[in-house]
Image (cartoon, coloured by chain):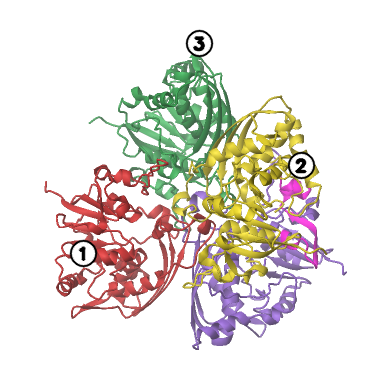
Chain colours: A green, B yellow, C purple, D red
Amino acid sequence: MQEKIPVAVVGATGIAGQQFLVALDQHPWFRVTRLAASERSAGKKYLEAISDASSGAIRWYCEEPVPDLVQTLVVEDAAECDFSDVGMVFTALESEAARVLEPRYAATRPVISTASAFRYEPDVPLLIPGVNLEHAPLIRIQQQRRGWKGFITPIPNCTTTGLAITLAPLQAHFGIDCVLMTSLQAISGAGRSPGVLALDILDNVIPYIPKEEGKVETETQKILGKLVDHTIQPASFRVSATCMRVNVKDGHTEAVFVSLQTEGELAEVKRAMEAWGSEFTSLGLPSAPPALIVVSEDPYHPQPRFDRDLYG
Amino acid sequence: MQEKIPVAVVGATGIAGQQFLVALDQHPWFRVTRLAASERSAGKKYLEAISDASSGAIRWYCEEPVPDLVQTLVVEDAAECDFSDVGMVFTALESEAARVLEPRYAATRPVISTASAFRYEPDVPLLIPGVNLEHAPLIRIQQQRRGWKGFITPIPNCTTTGLAITLAPLQAHFGIDCVLMTSLQAISGAGRSPGVLALDILDNVIPYIPKEEGKVETETQKILGKLVDHTIQPASFRVSATCMRVNVKDGHTEAVFVSLQTEGELAEVKRAMEAWGSEFTSLGLPSAPPALIVVSEDPYHPQPRFDRDLYG
Amino acid sequence: MQEKIPVAVVGATGIAGQQFLVALDQHPWFRVTRLAASERSAGKKYLEAISDASSGAIRWYCEEPVPDLVQTLVVEDAAECDFSDVGMVFTALESEAARVLEPRYAATRPVISTASAFRYEPDVPLLIPGVNLEHAPLIRIQQQRRGWKGFITPIPNCTTTGLAITLAPLQAHFGIDCVLMTSLQAISGAGRSPGVLALDILDNVIPYIPKEEGKVETETQKILGKLVDHTIQPASFRVSATCMRVNVKDGHTEAVFVSLQTEGELAEVKRAMEAWGSEFTSLGLPSAPPALIVVSEDPYHPQPRFDRDLYG
Amino acid sequence: MQEKIPVAVVGATGIAGQQFLVALDQHPWFRVTRLAASERSAGKKYLEAISDASSGAIRWYCEEPVPDLVQTLVVEDAAECDFSDVGMVFTALESEAARVLEPRYAATRPVISTASAFRYEPDVPLLIPGVNLEHAPLIRIQQQRRGWKGFITPIPNCTTTGLAITLAPLQAHFGIDCVLMTSLQAISGAGRSPGVLALDILDNVIPYIPKEEGKVETETQKILGKLVDHTIQPASFRVSATCMRVNVKDGHTEAVFVSLQTEGELAEVKRAMEAWGSEFTSLGLPSAPPALIVVSEDPYHPQPRFDRDLYG
C-alpha cells in the first residue's frame, strides 16, 4: 500500500472546514496532518478548539462524528503557517482572509479553496472534473505570472457547479442560446456566520441571496468558456439567475430553462446528458460518482432530502 | 343600512369551504345562511359536523375562530339542496362532485366555484377583477347555451391568479413574447385530502405537482386572451411553468422570466405595474386591496410569511 | 378624550423593541414619542436606522407594518438619554447594558424592562397582572432604598409567565407540593443576536437553553411567593424545569406535572383555573385578555400556531 | 459461510414494511425471500407494486435505495399466505389486520410484529434485548395455551422502548417510585396513512397523540415487570406520560423525571446507566449497538437530527 499524501486544512473549525475533514477522513490518497484556524483557536487540540469551555458544548456541525485522527491534532494560527511539509492545502476561509493568506500558501503548494477571492482572476481556472479539465493548463500560466511553485484552484459556487455540469452536454451537443435559472438553495450554503436564522426562514422563502446571482452568471460562463491564448473566453450565451433560499438543510434544487441552438428530441437530450462524463467516471477515481448526471423519469424527483446523498 | 344578501356555502366542512366562511364573515354585502357538505355531515349543526365525537377534536383549519353565525347552522346534504332562496352559492367541492352538482345550482343561481371542473369550458370565463372583467359578457352566452338562470364562474388556480395579475400590465404596455415561470408553492394549496404529508416536505422540495403546470399554462392564456365573437381567444404568447412544493404554509412565490415584445426601461415597467388596476381599486369595493400589484425595492421581498397578509 | 401619556422605547431597533412599538401603537393610554438604541443608530430617522444602506433591506421583524408614528422619529443614543419629559420608559436591552442604563432612567421614571438584569434583586418585584399585584408595594421599598423617583419592574421570562399564571389558582385553592415542567420553546424567544440558526433547529429539537431552567425555577418561586416584611419570601414548593427549543416561530408549549397538597376533583381544578383572575379581567383594561387561563376540552389544543394569537 | 435463514415481510409496501426490508438487507443471518401486502398489490413485482402507473412516481419512503434482492420478488396477498417454508415472519400491519392474520402465521412460525394488536395479551412478552430477556419463557406458555408451533413477539411502541431501556438500570440499582415523561415525537412514528399533515405540524406542536399515553404507561410497566408463575406482574411504579408531536422527521426526544426509591449520587446513576446491558452488547450480535445507553456530558445533546443515527 502506497503512503498517503499529507495535507493541511485551513479554517478547520468552521463548517466548510469540518466538511473537508469528513471528506478527507478515510480518503485513499490523502491524510490530514495539519490544521489551522484563527488565532483564537491556535495552540489548542482540535477537540478542545471546537468545545465551549463553559457549557461543554461541542461545535461540530457534520452528522458524521469528528474523525479520530484530527481530534488531538494541535490547531495552528493560519496567519503564521508554513505548509512546505505537506503536499496540498485545503482552505475554507472568509473571502478577505483568503485574499491575504492563500497566495502565501500557494507560493509553495497547491491550494484548493472554497473562497470566492480568486475565482474571477483571469489566470485562475474553475475546474470541475468531467466538465472543463481542458482549462487546467491555465495553472501553468498562473504559476509563471505570479512566480508561485504552487497554485490556487477555487471550488466554484455550489449552485454554479450543479448548473455547469448539467449544461455541459447540452452545450457540446446542441449549442446553448440562453439559460434562465431559478434556484431553491439550502441553508447549509449560508454557513454559520452569520448563517440563516430560523426566525427568517421557517414557514418562508427568502427570494434574494446577496451577490449569488452575479456569481452564478459569471462563473457558469467562465467554466463553460474556452481556453484561447492562455486566457479563458467566457461562453457567449446569456445566463440569468434568480436565487432564493428555502428551508432545506442540504441540497440545492434548480429549475432551468435552456434555449438550445439546434433542436433536439427529448430522447437525444436525455442520452447526451446520461452519457456525459463517462470517460471521467470510468477512471475510477476515489470520491468520483458512478455518473455525473442522473436523469430521473420520476417527475417527483430529484428531491433534496432523498437525492442529495446519491453516490455520496 | 341595506339588508345583506343571503348566500350558501357548499363543501363547508373542508379547508376551502372554511376559508369561504371566514372571508364571508362580517362581509358588508353577504351573509351566510345555508351550509352544505357531504351526506355524512347532513343534519348536524356545523360545530358538531366538524367535531370528532370520540376525541373531542374540532376539525377547523383557519387561524380565525369559527364565525359565530355559522356555528349553529344545520348542514345540509349538498346532493339534495335547492338554493333558490339564496342570492349566490359559493362551492368548494372536489372536481368530480363539482361537475355534477354545480350545474344544478347554476340552473337557478350564480355559482362561485373553487373547482377546476368548468374552468376549461369555452363558455366559462375565468374572471379576475381588475384584469379581465371584459370577459364578463361570456356569462350571458353561457346562460343562453345551457338554459341556466344562474351561471358558473370558477376561481382560477391560485398560482395562475398571481401570475396573470402580474402579466396583465406587461401585456397591455409592452406585449409579451414568452413567459417562463418557476413557482414555489405553499402546502395549503394542496388542501387536506390527501394534502401534503409532513414526512414528504420537511427539509425538502417536491419538484412536481400533478397537473399544475398544464393548468397554469392554459388558464393564464385564457385569462389574458380576448373575447372575440362570443369566444375567448387565448393569448398567443407561450407560457412554460415549473411548479414545485416548498415547506411554507400559505403564500406561493413565483420567479417569472418574461420576454417583452417592445423594450421597456425598468422604471417604465415598474410604473406600468404599480398603476395597473387603479380604476378597479378606486371603486372601493369591500375585500378589494388598495393596490393590485406592489413592487418592492427591497430585494429581500416579497417573502410569503411576511407579505402574504398584506392588505388581507 | 384624554391625552395620551408620552413614552420612550429603548433598544427600539431590536426584535423585542419592535414588539414594544407594535404593542404600543394604537394603545389608548400611551404614545411613543422617543426612541433610543445603540450609538450606531443615533441621529437617524427610525426607518433609516433599520434599513441596510447597501441592499435596501429593511430590518423589521414583526408581521405588522412599521407603525406610521415612529417611522420618522429620530433615534437617540441610549447611553445619553434623559427621559424626564416622558411618563414611562420601555427598555429592551441586553442584560449588561440594562444593568448600567436602567438605573439612570429609573432615577426619574418608571422603567418596564425585558432584561433579566434586575429580576433577582430583593427589592424588585416581578409583577404579573392578575397573579401577584400584592407585590406592588415593594416598588416603594425599591424607591426608598435606591433613592429613585422612578423604579424598575422587569417582565419575567416568558416561559415563567405562562407557568406562574397557570400555577396561581392551584396554589390558592389546593396548595402545591412540587412542579415538574418540560417546555417546548419557540425560536422567537432567542431573539436575533445570535438567535437560533435554521441549520441547528430544522428537523431537530435542541434539549438545552442556557440558563433558562434556573431562571424559570427562581422566578416562578419569586412570583408565587409572599411579601412579608418588605421582602418576598419565595414559594416553598420545588420547581424543576427542562427547557427545550423546537422549530416553532412563536408560542411556548409547556407540559407541567403538579403535585397538589390537597386533592381536587378534575372538575374543581378546572373551575379554579377558569375563574382565576376574573376580578382583574373584569376591570376592562386595554390589552387585558377576556380570560387569563383558557382550559380546552379538545385534547389537541393548545397548539402554538393556532392558539398563540388568542385574545391577541 | 453458513446459509442465511429465509424470512417473509408482510405489509411490505408500507413505510414500516420498507424499514424491515432495509434493515434485513445485508443482514448476516436473514434473507428476505417472500413479500406480502394487501390484495391490491398481489401478483405484482415489488418495484411495480410501489410504482404509480400514471405518474411514474415510486412510493419508496426510506433514504436507502430499494434493496436489489426484493425489487423483483412477486408480492403475495397477505390474507392467503402460507409461510411454512420460511424461518420467520416480520409483519408491519394495521392493528385490525394483525389481529386476524398474525395468529395464522404464528400457528407455524415465529412472528415479529410492529402492531399493537397482541401487546397487551397476558401470554405475549414485549421483549427488549438487554432489558427483559428473562420474559422469554412466556413464549412457551403462549405456544401451549394457543396450540401454536410459532409465536408472536410484538415490538413495543417506539416511545416506550427508549424509556424502558433508560429506566431499566435505575430500577435495578435504585428502585423506582414514579416516572413522569414528556415526549417530543417525530412524524415518522405516525406513518403515512393517514400520517401527519404538513399543514398541521409546520410551525407547530401537537400536544396529543391518540392512545399513545396509555400505551407508553402500560407497556413500560409490563416490560419492566417480573415473570412470576407464568405471568408478568407489571412494575408497581406509576408512569405518567404526556406525548406530543413535533416537526422532526425521525427520532423521539423524551424528558423524563424519575423519583428513585434509594438516593444515588449523580455519578453513580451515570455509571449504572453506562454499564447497563454490557453482557448483552458484548455478545457481538449483528445489529446490536456497542452500548445500550449513551450518557452525554454535553447539555446540548441528544438532538434527534444529530444523534438518531448513532450506531445505526
Q: Residues within 10 Å of mark 2 (few under 14, many from 20)?
A: many
Q: Nearer the viewer, mark 3 or mark 1?
A: 1
Identify whether A16 is placed above or below D228: above
State the residue at coordinates (35%, 24%): A278
Pointer 3: what residue? A229
Which is nearer the eye, C260 or A267?
A267
Q: Amino acid at mark 3?
A: Asp
Q: In 3D space, how far apart are the residues under numbered discs 2 and 3 (Cα atoms)?
A: 56 Å
Label 2 resides on the chain identified as B
Q: Quadrant of residue D139?
A: bottom left
How far apart, in angstroms, are the residues tagged by discs 3 and 1? 79 Å
Q: Is residue D88 left or right of residue A32?
A: left
| Residue identified by numbered label 1 | D104
- Residues at marks 2 and 1 on the same chain: no
Instruction: In this rendered view, identify the residue nearer to me: C287 or D48.
Output: D48
**Label 1 secondary element:** helix
Label 1, residues with CA under 10 Å away: few <14, some 14-19, many ≥20? some
Q: Position of residue C38 (x, y in %)?
A: 71, 52
Give the position of the C terminus of chain B as an image quadrant: bottom right
Residues rendered magenta in the picture: C22-51
Q: Is residue D105 left or right of residue B284?
A: left
The amino acid beneath tag 1 is Arg
**Circle 3 Cα neighbour tier, 10 Å, few/some/many (<14 / 14–19 / ≥20):** few
* Residue C87 appears in view: yes
In the rendered structure, the residue with mark 3 lies on which chain?
Answer: A
Residue with the most extreme top position: A229
Residue D163, image quadrant:
bottom left
Looking at the image, which residue is at 73% across and 59% down? C21
